[in-house]
Image (cartoon, grey):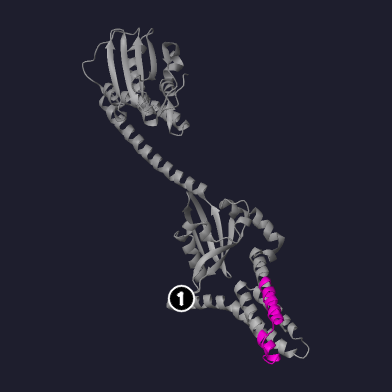
Amino acid sequence: MSGGRILVKREVVAARIGPYAVAAGWVLLAAAGQFALANWVARLASFTVFFPAIVAGALLGAGPGALGLGLSLALGWSYWTWTAGFAPPGSRDALDLFLIALSGALIVLIIEAYRRRQSPFSQAGLLFKAVQDIALEGMVVYRALLDRAGQVRDFEYRYANPAACAIMMNPSSDEIVGAKLLERLPLAREHAQLFLRYVRVFTTGETSETEYELGGRWFHSTAAKLGDGIVVTVQDVSVRRRGEDVQKLLLQELSHRVKNLLASVIAMANSTERGVTSTAEFRDKLSARLQALSRTHGLLMAGDWTDAAVGDVVRSTLEPHLETDAPRFRIDGPKIRVSSDVALALNMALHELATNAIKYGALSGQRGRIEIRWELHSDRPSYVLLTWRESDGPPVSTPSSRGFGTRLLERAFAATDGEVRLHFLADGLFCEMRFAGAIPNQQAVA
């Protein structure tokens, strides 16, 4: 492990010193040429042989260019004074030297500005630019900025394609190229997948691929070393991540509902078994209850299992009776939506009331009628008050014992802080249901 660190440090030092060594070599080569042409080069013109070396050094960077300029001035001045017999320079000589130094400095600055503005991929041609312009994946090229100890202190943007600019919410790369990563995005310094990861990629040379969250968005990113910096690809995968989260939530919800459904069916079967005297009666009762439950499940499926309208639950539960005896029913109420749990409880309660009406109440004769009405509770707007009133049926009396149907009705809305009251009136059964679960801001008169 230590050997690898030493190797990485050597690479960093070589990458840092190399351009300066090359710039110095160009200046020494120019100095050798100056001595070789000593008989033909005029005194003041002796500096001109150093300008190509200054340009070559500046092409490697501002630092190497400055080194080349300084060495050129030192060697040129030394040669100048030597040929002049070490005579003190006059004011004209000092002015000429200043102008030469100023010209060299301008050359270094102009080349550095051009080099910074130049795309690192300019030689790749128009094909590369066309591909990057239409690419959906963002690509950013950074140049590592090192301190005196050879450690990365920041990264400078050298290139960003349109997709990357869109991710960074910038209209064009002109606002990005030349900027510093930590100046644009200070929080990147402590983010494990940004600055720290980029430094690790640059120093080790190992490619890194990861997904991370930033500012409420998720990104998939790959980073690799490229010359004196790194290249990073990034793609916004927030939609996919949100889809995966929704899918997990739906699977959990499905598992929960399947368990509840199986528990309800088991409880329904056990309770039905205790209240029958034959296998045929058990089959018929259980089948009817399961069919009613199935119809409400289908209604909830149409609403993505989020809610259902009270009127739809009523009509769906009573569908077999409405197909043959619709004139005997009067159903009325505003459009109120309730949660899925309340819809299932209401379905079971209405099915029991309809079953009892067929056996003992208004639907057991030819003239009986049933009126169903519902409205928001006057004192508690989040509650619904639903009434079931039978009329013109056989005489009704209070039963001497409480059967399964009665117990089911009384407990139907217990989980939702609701209640059911049964009134055995002379002209027919009257039932009041009060249950919570009305969804706000979705009521409208039908």
Residue 356 visible in image: yes
Residue located at (73% from left, 90% from top): 36
What x and y, as percent, mark residue 160?
61, 58
Label 1: which secondary element: helix
Badge 1 amino acid = Arg
Q: Quadrant of residue 57?
A: bottom right
Relative depth, front residue between 168 and 29: 29
What x and y, as percent, mark residue 438?
39, 26
Question: Where 108 sits versus 381, above or below?
Answer: below
Q: Quadrant of the N terminus?
A: bottom left
Q: Is residue 62 left or right of residue 406?
A: right
What x and y, as percent, mark residue 187?
47, 57
Question: Where 341 sits versus 84, above or below?
Answer: above
**Residue at which label 1 appears:** 5
- Label 1: few (<14), some or many (≥20) within 10 Å? few
Q: Quadrant of residue 59?
A: bottom right
Q: Is residue 263 left or right of residue 217?
A: left
Most distant residue in the left direction: 400
Most distant residue in the right direction: 40
Relative depth, front residue between 374 and 275: 374
What x and y, as percent, mark residue 214?
48, 53
Q: Is residue 300 left or right of residue 65?
A: left
Q: Main secondary structure of the magenta part?
A: helix
Question: Where 118 sits versus 133, above or below?
Answer: below
Most distant residue in the front direction: 91
Q: Which residues are magenta?
A: 77-106
Magenta-colored stretch includes residue 65: no
Question: Where 217 sits versus 280, above or below?
Answer: below
Residue 136 visible in image: no
Magenta-colored stretch includes residue 96: yes
